[in-house]
């Protein structure tokens, strides 16, 4: 289970998140991009009140606010003050946007406040996911919709786990299924919502610079996750050999969106 102190270290600023976002921007084989695809899936109506939890550096809204109604009210929130400061600098001059520090496990709004709640790639980082889901359901209006993007359990993490095991068979890094993913997220959401739909975004990575993949792995490190400097060096050699043999490092992705409502 993710601890909040691990999160605080990982997400103090968007330094680590940006490294990972850049890898996907540079090397994804689906040229649409995850954020533009997510925007297409989320139905926003004039007057909607929207809450985003774990907004990170606000990439969902970058270059997009001009395309949505002048009457929406958007609360961008994250548990990291560094992330909140960043989205405040970027979006707060827009009178529709309010930026707040919020823990998804204890949302400081009244019951039935929002038409839409969004939590993209965030629930797996929350220590008590069941509590967060109850809170999200509580602050949604009766016919409101919750959108949450997540990875699946047959994507990049599983591929990296297999690669690490071929170097160090006893190493369990990346082996745990995420605590919230496209598969196990459905029954978790069904505890609070009557309908849960899953939409997948087909994609993979074709990485032509080994150092960029190693930087991605390094950006996920926590003090005791089993990926030390020596292993990083071995991984660099392993992936560079693949790159030279195949012309690129080909990595599967499994990513999509769960849509929950009543
Ligand atoms: C993987 S990032 C995703 C950021 C962004 N939604 C995106 O898709 O690029 C997870 C985010 O969740 C935030 N977070 C972690 N624990 C949280 C909590 N308990 N409540 C709200 N946000 C949290 C982190 O600070 C981080 O910004």
Image (spheres, rainbow, N blue to C red):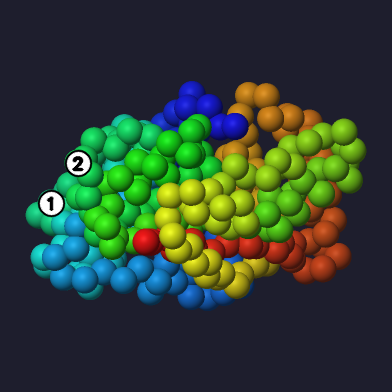
Mark 2 CB in 8 Å range of ligand 1?
no
Q: Position of residue 77 (x, y in %)?
A: 29, 43
Residue shown at the point (48%, 75%) measured from the top left: 32
| Vertical side of 73 occupied by 247: above or below | below
Q: Is residue 258 left or right of residue 211?
A: left
Please indicate, yes or no, whether residue 162 appears anywhere in the rendered image.
yes
Residue shown at the point (56%, 47%) measured from the top left: 180
| Vertical side of 36 occupied by 243: above or below | above
Tell me the residue that label 1 is attached to: 93
Q: Position of residue 177 (x, y in %)?
A: 68, 45
Q: Position of residue 96 (x, y in %)?
A: 13, 56
- If you read the primary sequence from the N terminus, does the residue marked by circle 2 or circle 1 appear first? 1
Quadrant of the snapshot with the N terminus: top right
Residue shown at the point (42%, 55%) measured from the top left: 193
Element on which disc 1 rests: loop
Q: Which sits in the foreground, 142 or 48? A: 142
What is the distance, in whole Å, between disc 2 and disc 1 at their CAs? 25 Å
Quadrant of the snapshot with the C terminus: bottom left
Q: Position of residue 99 (x, y in %)?
A: 22, 43
| Vertical side of 175 occupied by 196: above or below | below
Residue shown at the point (48%, 58%) measured from the top left: 149
Please indicate, yes or no, whether residue 23 appears anywhere in the rendered image.
no
Q: Which sits in the foreground, 167 or 102? A: 102
Kindly identify which numbered label has been placed on residue 6: none
Kindly identify which numbered label has been placed on residue 110: 2
Mark 1 neighbour density, 10 Å: few (under 14) some (14–19) many (20 or more): few
Viewer-side label of 2, 1: 2
Q: Is residue 26 left or right of residue 260?
A: right
């Amino acid at each position: 289970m993710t601890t909040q102190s691990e999160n605080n270290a990982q997400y103090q600023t968007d330094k680590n998140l940006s490294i990972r976002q850049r890898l996907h921007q540079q090397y994804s084989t689906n040229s649409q991009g995850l954020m533009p695809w997510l925007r297409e899936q989320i139905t926003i109506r004039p007057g909607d009140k929207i809450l985003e939890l774990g907004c990170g550096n606000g990439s969902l809204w970058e270059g997009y606010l001009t395309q949505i109604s002048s009457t929406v009210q958007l609360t961008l929130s994250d548990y990291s003050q560094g992330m909140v400061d960043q989205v405040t600098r970027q979006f707060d001059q827009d009178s529709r946007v309010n930026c707040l520090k919020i823990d998804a496990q204890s949302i400081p709004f009244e019951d039935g406040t929002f038409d839409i709640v969004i939590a993209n790639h965030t629930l797996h980082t929350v220590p008590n996911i069941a509590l967060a889901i109850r809170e999200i359901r509580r602050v949604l209006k009766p016919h409101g919709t919750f959108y949450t993007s997540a990875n699946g359990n047959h994507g990049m993490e599983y591929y990296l786990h297999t690669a690490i095991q071929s170097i160090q068979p006893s190493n369990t890094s990346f082996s745990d299924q995420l605590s919230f993913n496209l598969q196990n997220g459905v029954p978790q959401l069904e505890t609070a919502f009557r309908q849960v739909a899953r939409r997948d975004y087909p994609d993979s990575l074709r990485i032509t610079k080994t150092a960029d993949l190693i930087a991605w792995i390094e950006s996920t490190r926590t003090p005791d996750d089993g990926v030390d400097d020596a292993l990083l060096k071995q991984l660099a050699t392993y992936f560079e050999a693949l790159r030279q043999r195949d012309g690129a490092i080909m990595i599967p992705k499994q990513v999509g969106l769960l849509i929950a409502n009543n």
